[in-house]
Image (tube, coloured by chain):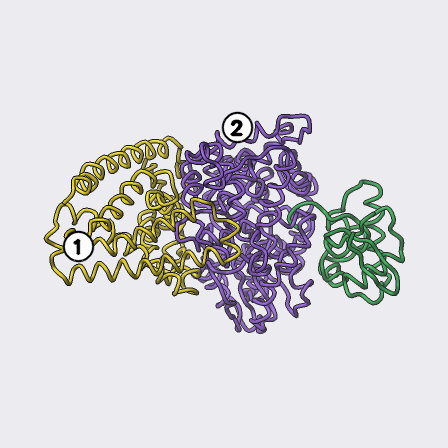
Chain colours: A yellow, B purple, C green
Amino acid sequence: MSDMLRLIENEVQLAALAFLGLVYIVRLIWIFRFASRKERTFAAGSQGAGIRRSLANIAMPWAMESTRKDPWLYAQFVVFHLGVAAAIAATFIIPYAPHVFEIRAVVLLFQAVIGAAFLAGVLRLVRRLVNPVLRLISSADDYVSLVLMILFFAAGFLAVPNDIDRAEWPLIAFFGLTAFFLVYVPFSKISHYLYYPFTRFYLGRTLGHRGAIPQGTRPMSPGKDNERTSRPKGDPR
Amino acid sequence: MAGGRLQTYDPAGDNVRRFLELLAGRLTRPLTVSLTACVHCGLCAESCHYFLARPDDPTMTPVWKADQIRKVFKRHIDWTGRILPWWVKAGSVHDDEDLNRLKNIVFGSCSACRRCTYNCPMGVDTGLLVRFTRGLLTELGVVPEGVFNVSRDQWETGNQMAVSEQDYLETLEWMRDEVRAELGDDKVDIPIDRPDCDILYTINPREIKFDPRPIAQAAKIFHVAGESWTLPRWGWDQTNFGLFSGDDRLGAWVARNVYEAAERLRAKRIVISECGHGYRSTRWEGYTWAGFDQRVPTESVVVTLKRHLDQGRISVDPSRNAEGVTFHDSCNIARSGDLVEEPRDVLRRVCSDFREMTPNRRENYCCTGGGGLLSMAEYRPLRLEVAKIKAEQLRATGAKYVCTMCHNCIDGLNDVIKHYKLPMKVVQVLELVSKALVLPEKGGRG
Amino acid sequence: MPFIEIEGRRIEINEEGFLARPEEWTEETARLLAKAEEGLDDLTESHWAVVKFIRDYYLEKNLAPMVRKMCQATGFTLTQIYDLFPSGPAKGACKVAGLPKPDGCV
């Protein structure tokens, strides 16, 4: 193994990861500096149930008309993000648990997942370039982030065999991209996973409190009296 | 009383700077994350009746509309856009013309129905962003004339139609006399400011000014049910233009009037007549705007009617409403509130041919007049054009009546029905219950 | 400016279908508006009683009258007003009387 590969697999990754962690901490402090309002009304539902339902929305394609009507798009979403998970896992397996990729079946599995994600990424790029709505709203960040992910999948696909005797360049490309990602991601739309718990939490809290979600599980306002209504809960802040 | 609190547009003012200051000062955490989280996936597009009706116009999508405020946020508040604006499509507002353009988007091409919110995989609340932006513009007086006029009336008179106290009281007396004549019972009353009642009944000024029939229907049913109720002399307007204009201070003031009326009269419960935005404002948002901790149950009159039916305090004959009835869920009640099954439960008991429209409940389409659009004449042509989605949905039910528990939806749906020549009539739950009501034998409860 | 064309005449209306220039109202306009907007082929004496009251009230106070005042002045019950003008007092009768659209949730 060349010194360059060793460096890029280890020190560079850790430095980039530390940078990402640091920026995210500042980012979270920034988010928490914005106030959230206190709920003052009697509940008609449950904040907790609403939050849980809202967070689980990602795994419930039947719950939204938008994903129900277009399961193909939802399938692409799943494949794409499984690929992301597999590629990120590979960035840790290769330097810290290389024996895992000595098992041929594991390598093939990772290649299948990352390869499928590559195809999903290409489809998503085509959609973004062809659909007039997406063309109008897309920014450079939207395109570049997606193209980078597609390249990342391609590099990951080639890197997971971890066969440095044949060629080191796929690994250098893969880890080079990873390091770049770790630095770029906090400033890009790719950080949406950091915001997902927040948007989902607040939406779920409000709509859960009002009994608007989860749908179909809230008992009807009882005919007699709504003593069932609980006192407003304190802000969970 | 509250004059001077409504901002008028000052063409010489530094409106752009004020706009940016307000934007920075009013951001809350839910807003901030809704502004940062959008990934431009475009899934919201087809949840919006504006885009469904104009599929070739990407500016009709919720994401594009939200991006018009999002780009300003990115340019001035968020990180990357402040350094590399073009990279993330960040941009600012430069002059009053830009503010005016923004006004036409957030007031004119969105009914704030929140259907896209429910269809966003990321949980971005575009409905919330639209109301927030409206509020910034309202603060600068950059608002549609209709919204301005109604807000002014509500500030100045405590009700959105500038009904005087005398007119209010006389109309209630008139309705009382009508119900007395109808039932042949002089004990029927529409009490004003009676303390210690079970119910404080609050209404929409439209019921006083143009259509007081729902007041008579409620009075009749309450009388038969032996309800202890009153209307307040002040604080009777449950509607709230603060919801539409995004002005939390107006919202707080109007809602507080209702809450304080209930305190003053020691009412055990606030009941809101059939009104979507009034229900959302008084039951949910108002307490937050006013910083007022809820103390008494606050409910829609439909829930009150359901209770009367459940407890056997009124009996009904569904054969009196024999023709097909479908139900239109109000956005503000179904998506931003809690009542979905309750009105259906009542309708199934008072109608013999109840049928759902598709989609329904929380996926229903807006009546197209929501978000205050009925009071904004300048946006009517677009509103009626995109109403074709609603018209098709209504037509497919084949029902003779479309029932809704919202005054705003009545007028919105009436416009759709007239414009698209649908053979339908709009009714409310009170009207159907009143029609089905079986009057007790004379000498019974009185 | 949108308009309606009826019996070969052209009436300019605003976006809400109300008369563009309320001051230009004539009895002929009322008849045409009633036909085009309310589907009323003929205005009876009862219609005219309501329309004229609204018109006079508006000219005097620059305001649409409350429905109670319409009933008091004309002697009609609320139901009769709705029978006469299917779109109701605001969007029906006031429109025929050439008033601008009333403010608020109507």
Determine the CA span between mark 2 and mark 1.
60 Å
What residue is shown at x 64% (from left), y 27% (from top)? B4
Residue A25 position in % (x across, y down):
29, 33
What residue is shown at x 31% (from left), y 42% (from top)? A181
Pointer 1 chain: A
User: Which labelled disc corresponds to residue A166?
Assistant: 1
Callout 2: helix, strand or loop?
A: helix
Q: Is residue A180 left or right of residue A100?
A: right
In the rendered image, the residue lying farthest to the top is B13
Front of the two marks 2 and 1 = 1
Q: Is residue B145 left or right of residue C74?
A: left
Asked if badge 2 and badge 1 are on a common chain, one would say: no
Q: Give the camera-side residue of B378 and B242.
A: B378
Q: Is residue C45 visible?
A: yes
Residue A196 position in % (x across, y down):
35, 46
The quadrant the N terminus of chain B occupies is: top right
Q: Is residue B256 left or right of residue A125?
A: right
How dense is the environment of label 2, judged by Cα within 10 Å: few (below 14), some, or many (20 and up)? Answer: few
In the rendered image, the residue lying farthest to the left is A99
Give the residue type that dot 2 points to: Glu
Q: Give the camera-side residue of B193 and B98.
A: B98
Callout 1: helix, strand or loop?
A: loop
Give the residue type that dot 1 points to: Arg
Q: Is residue B320 visible?
A: no
The quadrant the C terminus of chain B occupies is: bottom right
Q: Give the camera-side residue of B137 and A165.
A: A165
Pointer 2 chain: B
Q: Is residue B415 left or right of residue B80?
A: right
How dense is the environment of label 1, judged by Cα within 10 Å: few (below 14), some, or many (20 and up)? Answer: few
Residue position marked by numbered label 2 in the rendering = B21
Q: Give the camera-side residue of B54 and B263.
A: B54
Residue B29 position in % (x across, y down):
40, 37
